[in-house]
Amino acid sequence: MDEQQTQASDEEPEVPREDARRRRRRKKAISASSCASMDQITVEFVLPTAARGGSGPDTLPLEVAGNWTVEQVKAQVWLKAVTLNLCPDFYQRFSPDHCILLYQKKGNVCEIYDKHQVFQTLDCIRYWRALKKDVGRIQLVPRPQPSDESLQYQRYLNCLIGYDVTDVSNVHDDELEFTRRKLLTPRRIELSERDAKLYSMDPWVTRKPLPEHLLTKVSNAHVLFVIHIRMASQTIKVALDESPAQVLASFFAKTASKRVLLGIPDGVCEADFVLRVCGREEYLYGDEPLQDFNWIRQCLKNGEEIHLVLETPPDTDLDLVQKEDWAQVDDCTGVAGTHEQLTIDEKDHERVFTISMWDCNRKFRVKVLGIDIPSLPKIPEFIVSIEASIFHGQQLLAQERTSSKSFSEEVLWNCWLEFNIKIKDLPKGARLNLQVVCGKQPQTPNSKGASAFQDNAAGTGNHDGKAGRHSLSASSSHHPDTPSERLRLCLRPSGKTKSRLLYYVNLLLVDHRSLLRQGEFILHMWKMPEKSEESSSSINADKLTSATNPDKASAMAVAILLDKYCYPVVLPKSRDAGAARDAAAAGEEAEGGERGQREMPNHLKKQFAAIVATDPLHPLSPEDKELLWHFRHECMRDPSGLDVGLAMQLLDCHYSDAQVRSMAVRKLETLEDDDVLRYLLQLVQAVKFEPYHDSALVRFLLKRALRSKRIGHFLFWFLRSEIAQSMHYQQRYAVLLEAFLRGCGEDMLQDFRKQVEMTEGLQKVTREMKAMSADKCDITAQGERGAARPAPPGGRLLWVTARSPG
């Protein structure tokens, strides 16, 4: 009877819940009139000016359209303030950008930071609706200027980082500053939740079972501890399953009559002391048993005595973080609306302020204007062309190529390249890869044949607004249909010409705000290094960067033009309700739909959990496979069934989808500090494969570094090494390192400063020694000076070499 009731309670509510969902979907109309009533949001704006003779600031109620952008909302508030003649000196003198928007959320002041974001997607709107507030409240305050103290602190951090994160001279958007502000939220959350004592002592523990070979070295699960205090010591016998607090209690109980001899003052107890490993900045602290501390296991493995020091705990005030000048940004900053909110279908065009990318059915195209290089190659017979490709990760989506022209200081094409992919099909993270491919002018005995090749190449460069297409051979009767085939034929080492890659650059087609790129761009390209300069793995990673070459004076520059639109074109965050409904009717769930765990019957939850908990190599029955496929979205949300090695593979360069990479990071969040340290170097390298600066992997590294000083120390030097060596990813690593350093206390910052000064000092000595040895190693110079200077005594030189630690 109970089982029947349980099954009924699991299955019967699904039907009305589905019916209710369908009824709710049918209620959603997308006409202009219904949207006007549904998307109007009443907001009271507190202005930065005060009314004459009034005691408080001016307030201005405004009906805000939900599809307005934040920038448009500020402009409307400014316009209404001017219309009402509220302090005309202020509103006519300054522009809306003079002020920022702030609101209160759970006692915290949050800033609405992204001016391009659609108003109804803001976190404050969701917060007000959850509180059932009919009128929201937003305050306009003048944009704060950095104080002298904050500027000095920023210079201090830049010195530790080895890069100026405030320098935006080499960026074509605000992603750098955008990421700096967004990483403030996870940093504050981690700092508010961490245990001050646990962080200051950072015990090194593991939760793996104690190996059997170590248990054999312990008699009756007890070990001897030698505890030192000042000049005295005391040996006690403790059990491995005891905690450090129990060890201290036992020590004080056994030494109650020896306090004077041991120098322990009266009025103190075991809670006022901690145990530190002799000769190391490592503490035994916390609720874990002694057998879980790595130092205890190391001593048992080596058969060494365990010596500890009884001392007062470190001062937690040394780990206090400097107060931030920035306000916490909106949790939904940079989040786009749904397709239903952004689509122009069945909407009044006068109320359209943004366009959904999924409404753009035309093919993507780019206009290659030309290239400019300060110094020409030495061989004047070179011909050059631009190869344009669209990649998502390592997957090639489309590819086109311009005609070949003679290499000169300035080469102009001014032609459109149309790709075989529609704008609506461009995924987030797709990048436009531009490469300068160079080859020698084909040498033929007949100059007429050479001119025919040039005429054919130039004639196929279409300048009438259509895609420029390059004929591969003047006499070839085969016309390749695919871009890869055209590229293969063009680059094949024939007897006439050989081509090679000289320069490259990438441009993300959808920026960090989910906006489609528009307008003209001048991109400074990276030079393809010689084979002897760098390893192939480093070159492949560098070719994925979306940064441009900071050396603008000597770098090749390419100018391109993307289609312009009257409004911002936004990539929606999920499928519209209509697509979800159609897919559900067809028996399949839409891409953006989610199947909540509550929809899984209770009698299947245990079976599902048992399947996930089994060994990955265990064969699955057909019933298990069907269950996993039916609830495959549950598998994506549950990282426990994912192997760590597979999670690391999902973070390599072949996977650019944010959801896939986030799923891998959720698995890594279950790792202990020991395992994170083991994979830390690989994880730092995997940051290169993220399309954007802000990612789940970056936030994971930031949180774990702020949680453990040991992880933070290694992360600091891994990041600083990449900043010093990799110009392609300097900005990304510098932003992450700055976010970490802003969460460190003064004590840790001083330790980093001393380490940096020592490292720079060693590098300086190394450079000076190499400079002094350069003349001695120069055989030509020695021969010229041989007659003038006698050889050193003994006829041999003792060479002292040093390698730079950086």
Image (tube, rainbow, N blue to C red):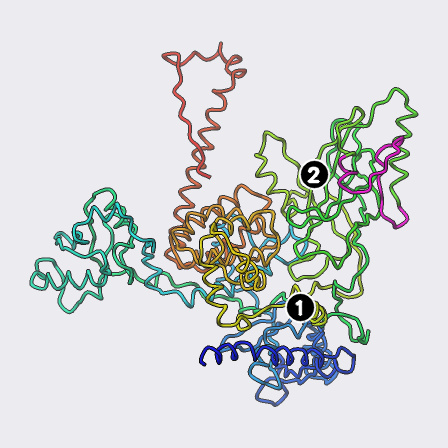
Q: From the image, which quarter does the N terminus lie in? A: bottom left
Q: Nearer the viewer, residue 668 or 225?
A: 668
452 on left or right of 88: right
Question: Who's the residue at 71% across and 74% down the image?
Answer: 67
Residue 116 sits in which quadrant? bottom right
The amino acid marked with disc number 1 is Lys
Q: Position of residue 502 (x, y in %)?
A: 70, 35
399 on left or right of 263: right
- Identify the residue under disc 2: 503
Q: Secondary structure at mark 1?
A: loop
Q: Earlier in the sequence, mark 1 or mark 2?
A: 1
Question: Who's the residue at 42% across and 27% down the image?
Answer: 801
Q: Position of residue 422 (x, y in %)?
A: 78, 56
Question: Who's the residue at 63% across and 66% down the image?
Answer: 335
Q: Which residues are magenta?
A: 463-488
- Identify the residue under disc 1: 115
For label 1, the crowd category at 10 Å Cα-Cα, with few meaning under 14, some 14 to 19 and many 20 or more, is: some
Q: Nearer the viewer, residue 417 or 12?
A: 12
Asked if the stretch drawn in magenta spans residue 486, the answer is yes
Residue 71 visible, this orientation: no
Q: Give the residue at the far left of this rendering.
A: 257
Residue 164 disc label = none
Residue 671, compared with residue 368, is above or below; it is below
154 on left or right of 292: right
The amino acid marked with disc number 2 is Tyr
For label 2, the crowd category at 10 Å Cα-Cα, with few meaning under 14, some 14 to 19 and many 20 or more, is: many
Q: Of helix, strand and loop, which mostly describes the magenta segment?
A: loop
60 on left or right of 494: left
